[in-house]
């Protein structure tokens, strides 16, 4: 039987998808992050040459994406903690909007500081 | 039946036929004003194909037995106007999701009610046989929490809407956990810790991802997600106190 149901197009489900996708994205990034940190063990030059590469504009834009992912996951995580540990609030959409706004703001601030 | 909205206007209705393996049959039904989806199915069964199987009883949104998937969303068909859900003049009807299909639009709800018991949905009287009224203030915090969820009639709409049930067939389900939450908050219940223990299991309240599909589709506008969040808090508190 067709199991592809359109029951998921609403804000709280999108918040779940964003949280899951950002979490997976960060998990994929983490090994790369550790690899770069480990470059320091090989000496100053190896790390510095990589850090110079990160100054390129396109890399900065990609980094902004990463910062937004991190901010989405953090704000979404705080939203979930509030949902599960604090008394129930009926303004769930407002919480999602606040979390999304916060994530975008953090990304924009990072972008402004980068250039 | 009331007058037709437009002379000759028809709705194309696709109905699931068979069990898990089956197919859609297409029917053409006159479109009428204020016609519900239940009216549409009844028209088909009474006038076109008497072998179409479906359930209904009260026709006025009290019993919950006519729930099915209407254009992909779980709904009470008796409270859904055809004109509200028509997509390009078409309606697709399927049996409730997440439940075994008996035939056509009829599901086997045994697992739904078995989970009701599994989630500790049975009231345990603290004063069995008492002829006295229990005095419970409607304003008390616990009674308010119980009252918020007490109107559930067990129609299975939230259960069909829930992705966690689809992903983990052992998951107790939103209606069942909502019921448990009303009992945890019922001061007349003798085994409130037992209700918490029943839901603090692997596929219990902590398995909920808070998608809130249940809350979105509940025809009675109840909020099972809020009840489950309450259970998450209550079980955690009980565990910290060593009660679980």
Image: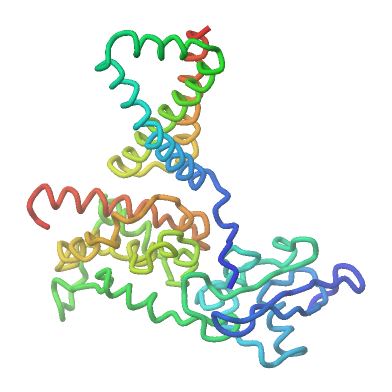
Q: Is residue B192 above or below residue B95?
A: above
Q: Residue B88 in the image: x percent, y percent?
A: 79, 61
Towards the viewer: A47 or B118: A47
- The answer to whether any part of residue A62 appears in the image is yes
Q: Residue furthest left?
A: B242
In which quadrant of the rendered view does residue A44 lie? top left
Q: Residue B153 in the image: x percent, y percent?
A: 43, 71
In which quadrant of the rendered view does residue B55 lie? bottom right
Towards the viewer: B228 or B206: B206
Towards the viewer: B11 or B92: B92
Q: Is residue B50 left or right of residue B21?
A: right
In which quadrant of the rendered view does residue B58 lie? bottom right
Residue at (37, 37) in percent of width and height: A27
Residue at (68, 72) in percent of width and height: B37
Q: Is residue B147 left or right of residue B27?
A: left
Total marks shown come to 0
Report the coloring of the rendering. Answer: rainbow
Q: Quadrant of the N terminus of chain A?
A: bottom right
Residue at (7, 52) in percent of width and height: B242
Towards the viewer: A19 or B121: A19
Q: Residue furthest right?
A: B7
Q: Residue furthest bottom?
A: B50
Q: Is residue A95 left or right of residue B244?
A: right
- The answer to whether any part of residue A91 appears in the image is no
Q: Residue A86 in the image: x percent, y percent?
A: 29, 40
Q: Is residue B164 above or below residue B65?
A: above
Q: Residue A100 in the image: x percent, y percent?
A: 49, 30
């Amino acid at each position: 039987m067709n199991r592809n149901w359109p029951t998921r197009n609403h804000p709280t489900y999108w918040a779940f998808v964003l949280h899951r996708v950002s979490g997976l994205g960060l998990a994929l990034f983490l090994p790369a992050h550790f690899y770069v940190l480990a470059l320091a063990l090989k000496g100053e030059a190896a790390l510095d040459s990589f850090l110079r590469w990160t100054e390129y504009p396109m890399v900065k834009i990609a980094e902004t994406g990463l910062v937004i992912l991190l901010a989405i996951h953090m704000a979404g995580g705080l939203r979930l903690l509030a949902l599960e540990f604090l008394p129930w609030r009926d303004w769930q959409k407002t919480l999602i909007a606040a979390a999304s706004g916060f994530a975008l703001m953090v990304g924009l601030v990072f972008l402004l500081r980068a250039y | 039946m009331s007058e037709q909205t437009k002379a000759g206007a028809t709705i194309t209705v696709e109905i699931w036929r068979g069990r898990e393996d089956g197919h859609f049959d297409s029917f053409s039904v006159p479109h009428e004003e204020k016609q519900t989806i239940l009216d549409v199915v009844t028209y088909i069964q009474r006038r076109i194909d008497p072998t179409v199987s479906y359930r209904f009883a009260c026709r006025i949104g009290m019993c919950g037995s006519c729930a099915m998937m209407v254009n992909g969303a779980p709904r009470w068909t008796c409270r859904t106007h055809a004109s509200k859900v028509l997509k390009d003049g078409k309606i697709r009807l399927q049996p409730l999701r997440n439940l075994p299909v008996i035939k056509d639009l009829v599901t086997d709800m045994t697992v739904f009610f078995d989970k009701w018991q599994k989630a500790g949905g049975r009231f345990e009287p603290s004063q069995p046989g008492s002829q006295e009224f229990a005095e419970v203030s409607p304003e008390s915090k616990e009674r308010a929490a119980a009252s918020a969820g007490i109107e559930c009639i067990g129609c299975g709409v939230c259960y069909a809407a829930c992705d966690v049930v689809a992903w983990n067939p052992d998951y107790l389900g939103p209606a069942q956990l909502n019921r448990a939450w009303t009992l945890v908050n019922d001061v007349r219940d003798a085994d409130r810790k037992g209700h918490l223990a029943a839901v603090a299991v692997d596929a219990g309240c902590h398995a909920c991802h808070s998608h809130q599909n249940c809350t979105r589709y509940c025809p009675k506008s109840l909020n099972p997600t809020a009840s489950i969040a309450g259970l998450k808090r209550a079980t955690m508190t009980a565990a910290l106190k060593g009660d679980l």
